[in-house]
Image: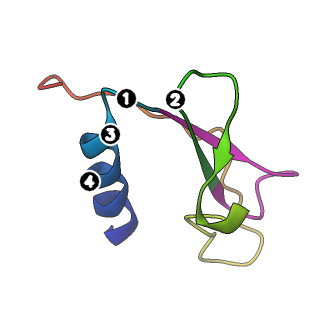
Amino acid sequence: MRYLLALALAVSVHAADWHLFTSFRRNGETGVFLALSQEGRKWEPLNGNQPWIKPEQPGMLMRDPFLTRDAAA
């Protein structure tokens, strides 16, 4: 939950100026990765190119992450 709060705060501060991209690596066993871009072409990985959220259980996959705006945005 703390990861989602940190992510929500980061996105709300820069929502007008930045694009946030989510991804997974390999088969999804490494976790969820984030990257930022101002123009949508050159992406800068966040968190030192390490996952923001890691699977909690061995064998757990974290695949196909996505972002959405809530109705207030």
Q: Secondary structure at mark 3?
A: helix
In the rendered structure, does residue 24 fall within the stretch colored magenta? yes
Q: Is residue 50 visible?
A: no
Question: Looking at the image, which residue is at 32% across and 33% down?
Answer: 15
Q: Is residue 37 above or below residue 12?
A: above
Q: Marks 1/3: CA distance?
A: 5 Å
Is the Cβ of the residue at disc 1 closer than 8 Å to that at disc 3?
A: yes
- Amino acid beneath label 4: Leu
Range of residues picked out in magenta: 19-32
Q: In the rendered image, which residue does mark 4 sit on? A: 9
Amino acid at circle 3: His
Residues under labels 1 and 2: Cα distance? 6 Å
User: Can you tell which mark lies on residue 51?
Assistant: none
- Looking at the rendered structure, the number of numbered marks drawn on it comes to 4
Mark pair 4, 1: CA separation: 14 Å
20 magenta-colored? yes
> Which one is earlier in the sequence, the residue at label 4 or at label 3?
4
Give the labeled residue for mark 2: 38
Q: Is residue 22 above or below residue 61?
A: above
Q: CA distance from mark 4 to mark 3?
A: 9 Å
Q: In what element is the residue under mark 4?
A: helix
Task: Give the residue at mark 3.
Answer: 14
Q: Which residue is label 1 attached to?
A: 17
User: Please, what is the three-letter code of the amino acid marked with disc 2?
Assistant: Gln
